Image (cartoon, rainbow, N blue to C red):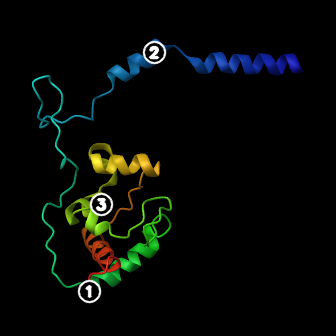
Amino acid sequence: MKKILAICVLAFVIASCGSKNDKEKTETNAPDTTTTATTETTETGNPSYDPKRGEGKFTNVELSQKLDAAKAEAGDKVYSVKCSSCHKLTDEKLVGPGWKDVTKRHSPEWIMNFVTNPDEMLDKDPKAQAMLEICLVRMPNQNLTDDDARNVYEFMRKNDGVK
């Protein structure tokens, strides 16, 4: 019985290894979706570095000096449902970084682009990639609407002491 089990395990291991050439053929025939035609390059042909190269549609978020209490309240509800399991309102890291002073560390545009489009930001934005190295867990896309993102940002401002 032990011999049969050993033979089955060995056969499984050999079958699962496969040929490296088959894998290379599959990978080389796959379409390249990581580059875009609009990427600028340097003289060496490498992509140029742009510290603001994160992906997103928010380019100018207008803020008033005074907190919008209604948006902050709506943002608190979104936080409770979609964010609180990974983020604390202090500077303590849970799964993701704490939110204390987050609006002082990042621009409103960056935050709103990140919360609405985390996959692209984590793939392309240096700040997001640096946070990923610390947290070790990719933020899942919570499918926030633009209004949800704005409300969450206003809640972050409230958490940071804006009145």
Residue type at the position of mark 1:
Lys
Q: Secondary structure at mark 3?
A: helix
- Callout 1: 10 Å neighbours few (<14), some, many (20+)? few
Instruction: Please name the residue that numbered disc 3 is placed on.
Output: 116
Who comes first in sequence, dot 2 or dot 3?
2
- Point out the image quarter for the N terminus: top right
| Residue closest to the far right | 1
Q: Position of residue 105 (x, y in %)?
A: 28, 63
Who comes first in sequence, dot 1 or dot 3?
3
Query: Viewer-proximal residue, 142 or 8?
Result: 142
The residue located at (76%, 20%) in the rendering is 8
Instruction: Give yes or no for contact between labels 1 and 3 (Cβ–Cβ under 8 Å).
Output: no
Instruction: Please name the residue that numbered disc 1 is placed on.
Output: 163
Looking at the image, residue 60 sits to the left or right of residue 154; the answer is left
Residue type at the position of mark 3:
Thr
Q: Secondary structure at mark 1?
A: loop
The residue located at (23%, 49%) in the rendering is 54
Q: Position of residue 23 (x, y in %)?
A: 45, 19
Instruction: Please name the residue that numbered disc 2 is placed on.
Output: 22
User: Which quadrant of the figure has residue 49?
Assistant: top left
Real-space Cα separation, disc 2 to disc 3, in angstroms? 38 Å
The residue located at (33%, 69%) in the rendering is 101
- Point out the image quarter for the C terminus: bottom left
The residue located at (33%, 26%) in the rendering is 30
User: Which quadrant of the figure has residue 82?
Assistant: bottom left
Q: Is residue 86 above or below residue 10?
A: below
Real-space Cα separation, disc 2 to disc 1, in angstroms? 61 Å
Looking at the image, residue 1 sits to the left or right of residue 126; the answer is right
Question: Given this view, does label 2 or label 3 mark the residue nearer the observer?
Answer: 3
Question: Given this view, does label 2 or label 1 mark the residue nearer the observer?
Answer: 1
